[in-house]
Amino acid sequence: MHQVSFAFDTGAATHQGRVRDHNEDSYLARPAAGLWLVADGMGGHKAGDFASRAIAESAQWTGIPTSALDLKTRFIDRLAIAHEDIRNHSAKLDGATVGATVVALLAYEQHFACIWSGDSRIYLMRGDVFQQMTTDHTEAMELLREGAITEEEAAHWPRKNVITRAIGVSDMPMTDENYGVLQVGDVFLLCSDGLTGHVSDEEIAEFLQNYGAQEACDRLIELTLSRGAKDNVTVLVVRCLPSDAYDNADAPTNPGYGPPIAMHDWKAED
């Protein structure tokens, strides 16, 4: 049986922005299953909204896990199904590029995992320490990791928004993973790049420190809109509370829109 070690205060908000005429972002929040995600349809391509929605809708059927490894396996399986659905949809559009970035937070008992593809992000606020838990899959970041350009050059790279990974665009889903141990008071933020294109890390940290989950989401969306919101923007905040804080029921979902590392808990035995 799934031992609930924490309760989760979840907030979520999404907006099409000031420029786009529709929202290609989707999100899903299932605290009782230990799963939250944001998917961002690839802007400028056909059916990006279909791609992000396919990921969120497939992930809804992840079910209730029996272990950390089971949760990860279930989610990866659902992601693979969404990947295939997106590929099939692309074929119906004569091979047009259809895809979406995804970032997911998984939590089982005291363990968490971040799984992502593309440039949507997860941040963690722990006490006064704020850190990005994901690494953008973009052309600029790839060149930076290879030492081909400097951080300053990466910040102004003319193709810095060109992503190198997304669900649905390659033969197989390509994701990265990061793992950790949950602590009471941890605050996670998942977002599409519509947020980080207008709001700095320092500002995000300040909002997480000063507001509850839903209010932080709403205020971050408002700030992004006030700065022009050139892209769709989605924000999901998860606060880690003691298990008896309140009923750990699922938060509302909107699939239509839009310590030490504990890796062994998420991986099969060798």
Image (cartoon, rainbow, N blue to C red):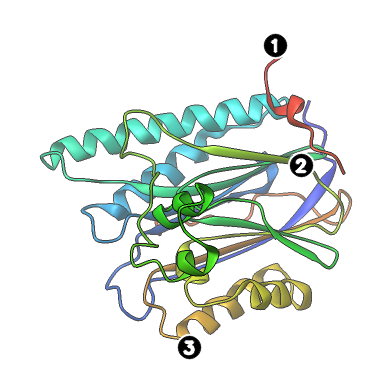
* Percent coordinates x, y for residue 3 in the rendering: 82, 33
Find numbered disc 1 in the image and state the secondary structure of the residue it sits on.
loop
Quarter assignment of residue 123: bottom right
Q: Residues within 10 Å of mark 1 (few under 14, many from 20)?
A: few
Q: Nearer the viewer, residue 132 or 37?
A: 132
Residue 270 has which mark?
1
Residue 180 has which mark?
2
Distance from label 2 to label 1 (Cα)? 20 Å
Q: Which amino acid, by three-letter code, is at mark 2?
A: Gly
Q: Which amino acid, by three-letter code, is at mark 3?
A: Ser
Residue 226 has which mark?
3
Q: What quarter of the picture does the N terminus occupy?
A: top right
* Percent coordinates x, y for residue 147 in the rendering: 51, 51
Q: What quarter of the picture does the C terminus occupy?
A: top right
Q: Earlier in the sequence, mark 2 or mark 1?
A: 2
Distance from label 3 to label 1 (Cα)? 51 Å
